[in-house]
Image (spheres, grey):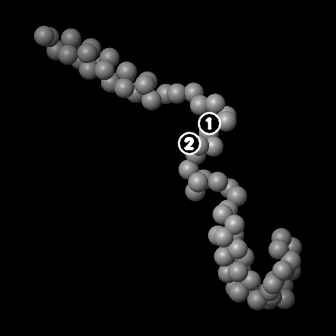
Amino acid sequence: MSLRAVFLIALIVSSGAVLGGCVRVAAHQREYLARPAMNPEADPLEQKLDTHVTEYREGSIGGSGVGGGGCGCN
C-alpha cells in the first residue's frame, strides 16, 4: 500500500469518527443530556444555604432582592 492510500484510509476513518459524534438533539431531550451544575436555578437546599450565608455576612434577615444590607448603606 502506498503512503497516499494509507493517508486516505486514515482520513476516512477519522472523519467518520468525528462526524459520528454530531447528532441533532430535540428540545425535549436536552433536559436529560444537560449537566445539573449548568442549571441556573439552584438546588433549594443550596439556595437556602446561600441565603443563610448572605444573612450572616450582611447582618440582615429578609428582604431578599432589595438594596441595602445590615451595614447601613444603600
* Residue at screen point 67% across, 34% down: 27
Left/right of residue 72 with respect to residue 59 in the rendered view: right
Q: Which residue is mark 1?
A: 29
Q: Position of residue 40 (x, y in %)?
A: 68, 56
Element type at marker 1? Answer: helix
Q: Amino acid at mark 1?
A: Gln
Residue 1, placed above or below residue 15: above
Q: Position of residue 32 (x, y in %)?
A: 59, 43
Q: Amino acid at mark 2?
A: Leu
Left/right of residue 70 with respect to residue 45 in the rendered view: right
Instruction: Give the quarter of the figure containing the C terminus.
Output: bottom right
Q: Which residue is mark 2?
A: 33
Instruction: Give the quarter of the figure containing the N terminus.
Output: top left
* Residue at screen point 66% across, 70% down: 45
* Residue at screen point 86% across, 77% down: 63
Left/right of residue 62 with respect to residue 32 in the rendered view: right
Q: Are marks 1 and 2 in contact (CB under 8 Å)?
A: yes
